[in-house]
Image (cartoon, coloured by chain):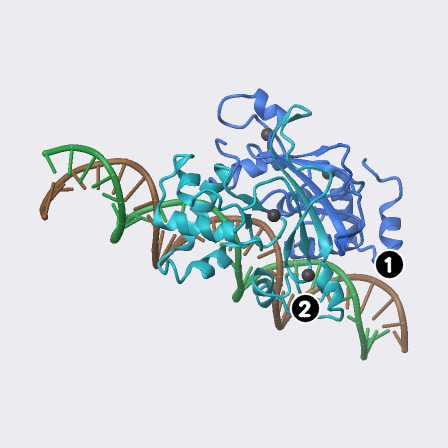
Chain colours: A cyan, B blue, C green, D brown
Amino acid sequence: MISNEKPLRALLGERGIKPTYQRLAILAEVLDRRSHPAIKDLHFGLKTKVPTLSKTTLYSTLELFARHGLVRTLRIDPVEARYDGWTAPHHHFHCERCGAILDLNLACPTGRRGCIDGHEIREVHGYFRGVCRSCLAGAASSASPKRGAARAALVKHPSRRYQHA
Amino acid sequence: MISNEKPLRALLGERGIKPTYQRLAILAEVLDRRSHPAIKDLHFGLKTKVPTLSKTTLYSTLELFARHGLVRTLRIDPVEARYDGWTAPHHHFHCERCGAILDLNLACPTGRRGCIDGHEIREVHGYFRGVCRSCLAGAASSASPKRGAARAALVKHPSRRYQHA
DNA sequence: TTTTCATTTGAAATCATTTCAATTTGGATT
DNA sequence: AATCCAAATTGAAATGATTTCAAATGAAAA
Ligand SMILES: [Mn+2]
Ligand SMILES: [Mn+2]
Ligand SMILES: [Zn+2]
Ligand SMILES: [Zn+2]
């Protein structure tokens, strides 16, 4: 629903990646989500379609996809990598209360490439952290009732984050 | 040597943080380094001055410092948190070959605060990743002979990163 | 000195990620 | 259809940063 214009097979084929059943399912799942899912979220979301899918495959496949520019690996969440199927340059906001990662569209582009100070730039990430709109609205202490990755993040992580503040 | 204008005791006192022997040593160590050290680097660097210092104290103290704006916690290295005693807004570059983290001074500021899309912004990070100047110079495969955190990162991390590419 | 409370410490637990060897898969060849 | 082979997948074990937790220490107050 995001950028599934081209069939998934083509996205893989163009890059010489064999369109395995697992790879197609993983690619579909990660492109289908705007929530910047973590490995465990993808694993959970795919358990019906690919019951035998291992986390090891998820790790290696997502690294493969990232290497070929099919997904972006976000490191804004200190606990776990989050993946983004939307590869156009944009910034990210991480809510330290509910764990949600949201897209931001700002002036400063993250698409910059080339060299800076002689260093070869391959990736640019603009990370903002704070308290998201809906957490601000749902005042008080406990995070507002979110779903998906945000909620998943909530129930886990003992006090690592996403607790009171 | 960086921003030790004020005595360290004052930096803590202003914020109501009791100037413990450990805290003063940790603060001195993190302010003294431009290498954006990880916990293990600080632990190693302090073993002479504070032989009994535990990593637990380092974790909790650095979190305390970060909460009070004395240091910034960088999440650009996927393996471990790196700490920055230079709190003025600036961007960071992470060399995926040798692990070094370098300061960048660019136009787009990271000092932005306030709200975006209704989200309350508390932290802004500009992360660039690629291959650093000296790694580019020292062509070939193995990383150029670096020191400090970069080297430390090298000898560790089996193939996690900092290997060939 | 005795009490009290914050800080420090080390050991154990947690958990994301990596490693690795074995199994499975699917295409090519016979 | 049967065989072969390299790539892909899998699960279990290892790794290592970070957190948890309860005991030990320290320092100020009574
Ligand atoms: Mn995004
Ligand atoms: Mn810096
Ligand atoms: Zn939130
Ligand atoms: Zn380098």
- Does residue B33 appear in the picture of this structure? no
The mark total stands at 2
Q: Nearer the viewer, mark 2 or mark 1?
A: 2
Find residue B33 and report its horizontal and vertical position in percent.
Answer: 73, 38
Find residue A19 and report its horizontal and vertical position in percent.
Answer: 36, 43
Q: CA distance from mark 2 to mark 1?
A: 32 Å
Residue type of the residue flagged with mark 2: Ser
Using residue A111 as the reference point, say whether residue A43 is left or right of it.
left
- Name the residue located 43 percent from the left edge and 51 percent from the top edge: A26
**Assess mark 2: CB under 8 A from ligand 3?**
yes
Residue type of the residue flagged with mark 1: Gly
Assign the C terminus of chain A to one quadrant of the image: bottom right
Q: Quadrant of residue B107?
A: top right
> Ligand 3 is found in which quarter of the picture?
bottom right
Label 2: few (<14), some (14–19) or many (≥20) C-alpha neighbours in 10 Å? some
- Which chain is indicated by disc 1? B
Q: For residue A144, which numbered disc appears in the image? A: 2
Q: Residue lying at the far front in this picture: please name it.
A: A5
**B120 or B72: nearer the viewer:** B120
- Which chain is indicated by disc 2? A
**Assess mark 1: CB under 8 A from ligand 2?**
no
- Does residue A92 appear in the picture of this structure? yes
Q: Which residue is mark 1?
A: B16
